[in-house]
Amino acid sequence: MSSFAEIEAALPSLSTSELQRLEQTLLHLYRKRNVPIIYDDSYGLWTEDDQMAAVGEALVLLDQPAPRKDHP
């Protein structure tokens, strides 16, 4: 089997229909492997890992100090 780097290098040469087929294959594999899925529709998946990553990014923003506004 090809390494991930080889697969990644081949992606730009795929046609749009081949990329769509690949995407459907990947979505099917996620479902088959019982990845914890929060949202699943024709546009794609939203998994627990996606949710945790989004929350982590939001918390980083919330933990930053608010910009100081000096009032005259």
Image (cartoon, rainbow, N blue to C red):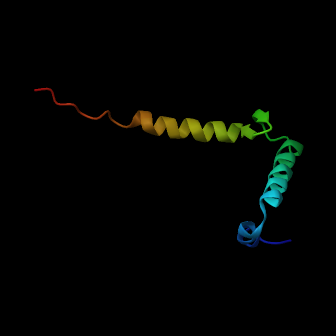
Q: Tell whether 24 sits left or right of 59.
A: right
Q: Residue furthest top?
A: 71
Percent across and percent down for residue 28 are 87, 46
Where in the figure is residue 1, as x and y percent of width and height? Answer: 86, 71
Q: How many discs appear?
A: 0
x, y percentage for residue 61?
Answer: 43, 37
Q: Residue at x 62, y 38 (%)?
A: 52
Q: Is residue 32 left or right of residue 46?
A: right
Residue located farthest toward the right when viewing the structure as drawn: 32
Q: Quadrant of residue 37?
A: top right
From the image, which quarter does the C terminus lie in? top left
Residue 40: horizontal and vertical position, in percent?
79, 35
Q: Could you say which is closer to the camera, residue 58 or residue 71?
A: 71
Q: Nearer the viewer, residue 14 or 31?
A: 14
Identify the residue at image location x=79%, y=35%: 41
Position of residue 43 in the picture relative to residue 32 (left or right) = left
Q: Residue furthest front?
A: 16
Determine which quarter of the picture holds residue 15: bottom right
Q: Residue at x 86, y 49 (%)?
A: 29
